[in-house]
Image (spheres, rainbow, N blue to C red):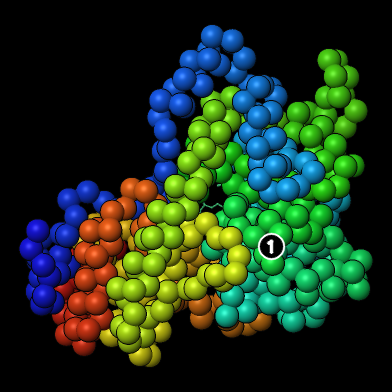
Amino acid sequence: MSRKKRPEDLALFGGPPAFDEPLHVGRPNIGDRSRLLARINDMLDRRWLTNNGRYVQQFEAEIAQLVGAKHCIAVCNGTIALELAIRAAGLKGEVIVPSFTFVATAHALQWQEITPVFCDIDPATHNIDPNKVECMITPRTTGIIGVHLWGRVCAVDALDQVARKHNLSVLFDAAHAFGCSHRGKMIGNFGRAEVFSFHATKFINSFEGGAIVTNEDELAKKIRLMTNFGFSGYDHVIYVGTNGKMNEVSAAMGLTSLESLNEFVSVNCRNYRQYREELTGVPGISVAQYDDADKCNFQYVVLEVDPSTAGLTRDQLKDVLWAENVLTRRYFFPGCHRMEPYRSNFPHSGLLLPETERLSQRILLLPTGTGVSPEAISRICEIIRLGLQKGPEVRRRLEGGGAGHA
Ligand code: T4K
């Protein structure tokens, strides 16, 4: 494999791409395939495929134990998990959320005709800024949903304080934070309930899947009923519900994935450290840090590009990498407030979201997980260093029409 030393070696300007196959952000971890297949065979032999099957029950028990929470309800995906938690917690009217998140956080509210009110983030943590929450509260506000972005924990105490003062419910979208902790307490124990995603792209996956964890007995009971049409027994419906059930194949994958949790975290951690080391000292970029004092899943490697000091903008760097088959992602660009229907409903909300607007122009996620080798990371870092160090020349070529990638 030839090294790339000059701008003309970059694939964007005619060099061969560094990778023959695309490298994705969110390539799934697979775990022990034979364990998964054994579970699927067992499930087929027993002819129990869904509806609170043995594997779903086991998956729920293992999550509850790992998190140290009283209740876990496994469901078909993280978005439905959010919708169920929001509905069961009785949220209505307006709910304060960050805009700098995956659109599912906002959609889970809007889907139920609850208005997401977007609050700006703290640039140091990328999470909702608790100091800005209070001024977003109106008489219609019923709750706050914090998102532990990248697995970094929200300002849980400060949010709790505001919520108590104004009698609001707090929920957490913990889609990124499974296996993470805050001051020794596992994520899953904050707010009234927390929601995980086990989508294929998450470090622990069940193909599609999600879970709600809570320490409130009544809330858990309600969510469980709602997940299964409101049935409390055969022919007996006592609540309005939906179909949010997780199936047995998903639970089989989830259990298999959990068995490899330590390995996945250590590979993620190794990748993260390598990226940080190899990108140290490159002007204008930084890799978001995690708190050593707490447990972390390291599932995201988050690069921030400062266009005033880096050789390229985030989008130019993305174009350089995509041409090399490194499919970095601009999570979460352009921010929910710039997506429909929020953009049309609240065309000026960006004025209250300066940090969200700034950060969503700067963040680039890099490929990691068990599908990415140390050699691949070295190669990716080499391209980033070359692109940025030769920034003026790359920019000149780009502006002269040399770019070919969307
Ligand atoms: N809250 C937050 C904060 C979230 O981040 C998410 C989901 C949710 C709530 C909702 O949870 P779920 O309802 O999804 O359980 C992806 C995921 O689809 C989404 O689950 C995730 N967040 C989000 C951060 O990323 P996309 O649209 O960016 O990309 P997608 O799904 O096409 O996959 C990303 C890349 O991964 C692809 O370029 C290819 C690769 N890939 C994907 C799949 C599915 C594979 O290599 N193999 C695969 O099987 O949303």
Q: Quarter holding the N terminus?
A: bottom left
Residue 400 position, x and y percent, is 16, 80
Q: Outermost residue, bottom direction?
A: 308
Q: Residue at point 56% right, 43% down?
A: 198
Name which quarter of the figure residue 304 lies in: bottom left
Residue beneath label 1, please?
184
Q: Residue at point 22% right, 48% down?
A: 21
User: In this orientation, does residue 271 appear?
Assistant: yes
User: In this orientation, does residue 341 appear?
Assistant: no
Kind of element beneath mark 1: loop
- Left or right of 330: which side holds 375? left
Closer to the camera, 99 or 325? 325
Q: Amino acid at mark 1?
A: Gly
Closer to the camera, 231 or 67? 67
Residue 326 position, x and y percent, is 28, 59
- Left or right of 28: which side holds 225? right
- Left or right of 178: which side holds 1? left
Placement of 181 over or under 394, stated as above or below: above
Q: Residue at point 21% right, 87% down?
A: 392
Residue 57 position, x and y percent, is 69, 28
Closer to the camera, 112 or 216? 216
Placement of 324 over or under 351, stated as above or below: above
Name which quarter of the figure residue 190 lies in: bottom right
Name which quarter of the figure residue 276 lies in: bottom left
Residue labelled 1 has its Cβ within 8 Å of some atom of ligand 1: no
Q: Residue at point 80% right, 80% down?
A: 135
Placement of 94 over or under 193, stated as above or below: below
Q: Quarter holding the C terminus?
A: bottom left
